[in-house]
Amino acid sequence: MLDGKNVGKIGNNSTLEIAAPAGSIIIEARIDWARSEPLTIETVPHQTVEIEVRNHWGAARGLGAITFGRGSYLLLTPR
């Protein structure tokens, strides 16, 4: 999600390239019922920003994430 709008889908071990406007943008990731915390980034023209999306809770704690970690199941990390 880019500024609250769905801009594409990304699969496991893949990449997604999005053209974003310059300025302050908000990135979020969602999978089924779960999502990431919003990540705010300041962008400039012709800048490339890489963001990694991963499971914040890990496989062993996945059941707890279903109940308690819905809003933080995914983690966005600038690279």
Image (cartoon, rainbow, N blue to C red):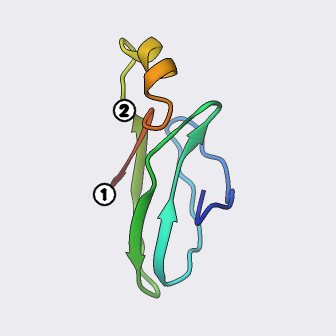
Location of mark 1 (residue):
79
* Residue found at x 41% / y 85%: 44
Location of mark 2 (residue):
56
Q: Position of residue 10 (x, y in %)?
A: 60, 45
What SS does tag 1 mark? loop
Q: Position of residue 56 (x, y in %)?
A: 36, 32
Q: Position of residue 49 (x, y in %)?
A: 40, 68
* Residue found at x 49% / y 72%: 25
Q: CA distance from mark 2 to mark 1?
A: 16 Å
Say which amino acid is labelled 1: Arg
Q: Residue furthest bottom?
A: 45
Crowding near the residue tagged with mark 2, few <14, some 14–19, many ≥20 C-alpha atoms within 10 Å: some
Q: Nearer the viewer, residue 73 or 67?
A: 67
* Residue found at x 39% / y 69%: 41
71 lies above or below 42: above
User: The C terminus lies in which quarter of the figure?
Assistant: bottom left
Q: Residue 64 appears in which quarter of the rendering?
A: top left
User: The N terminus lies in which quarter of the figure?
Assistant: bottom right
Crowding near the residue tagged with mark 1, few <14, some 14–19, many ≥20 C-alpha atoms within 10 Å: few
